[in-house]
Image (cartoon, rainbow, N blue to C red):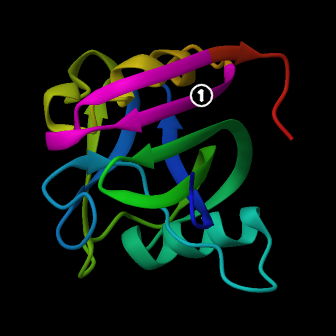
Amino acid sequence: MADKKKILTLCIIREPGRVLLGMKKRGFGAGRWNGFGGKVCEEETVEAAARRELYEEASVRVKKLKKVGILDFSFEYNSDLLEVHVFKGEGIRGNPYESEEMRPRWFSLDEVPFHEMWPDDKYWFPLFLADKSFRGRFHFGPDDMIVDQALSEEEKIR
């Protein structure tokens, strides 16, 4: 059973025909392409955290932010549960710039680098790209192999 639940955000910028991802340069998930996000600070809303993390990691702000998913992650080698609120961002202001933590890059929709992303992304990312809402659960074993999972399309995510 999980010792504690950590609330996190993940924001992926979507524009017609492309998505903005970042190469994680350090820490958890280093060496993988991912959306932008991180921990929700005390007395901060989940949406405010998503906006803050996006700016800290890629130097951009978004006009529209929509919560499209919630993903729960657990790991055999760590007893914490990660509850990740997934957002789609549209209408960026500013140009993406590399930070100490992330190197942003645009990908066309047919070039999303699933082979360099977390193994779960290939399951839920197609729902994201299809403008669907979803809820999922992924449990990782050794070498970040998925040993248990559940994913469902949802009418709306709150």
Residue at left offset 58%, top offset 62%: 8
Q: Is residue 3 left or right of residue 33?
A: right
Residue 143 magenta-drawn? yes
Give percent across and percent down for residue 86: 60, 44
Over which residues does the magenta segment extend?
133-151
Give percent across and percent down for residue 31: 13, 55
| Figure quadrant of residue 49 | bottom right
Which residue corresponds to mark 1? 136
Q: Residue 30: in sight, yes or no?
A: yes
Q: Residue 17: in sight, yes or no?
A: no
Q: Is residue 31 left or right of residue 2?
A: left
Residue at left offset 50%, top offset 66%: 54
Give percent across and percent down for residue 80: 50, 62
Residue at left offset 35%, top offset 63%: 96
Q: Using the image as rendered, state which of residue 142 and residue 115 is in the foreground.
A: 142
| Disc 1 residue type (three-letter) | Gly
Q: Using the image as rendered, state which of residue 3 and residue 114 is in the foreground.
A: 3
| Figure quadrant of residue 88 | top right
Q: Is residue 2 left or right of residue 75?
A: right
**Which residue in the rendered view is the most extreme toward the bottom?**
42
Residue 43 magenta-drawn? no
| Figure quadrant of residue 18 | top left
* Secondary structure of the residue carrying numbered label 1: strand
Q: Using the image as rendered, state which of residue 71 and residue 15 is in the foreground.
A: 71
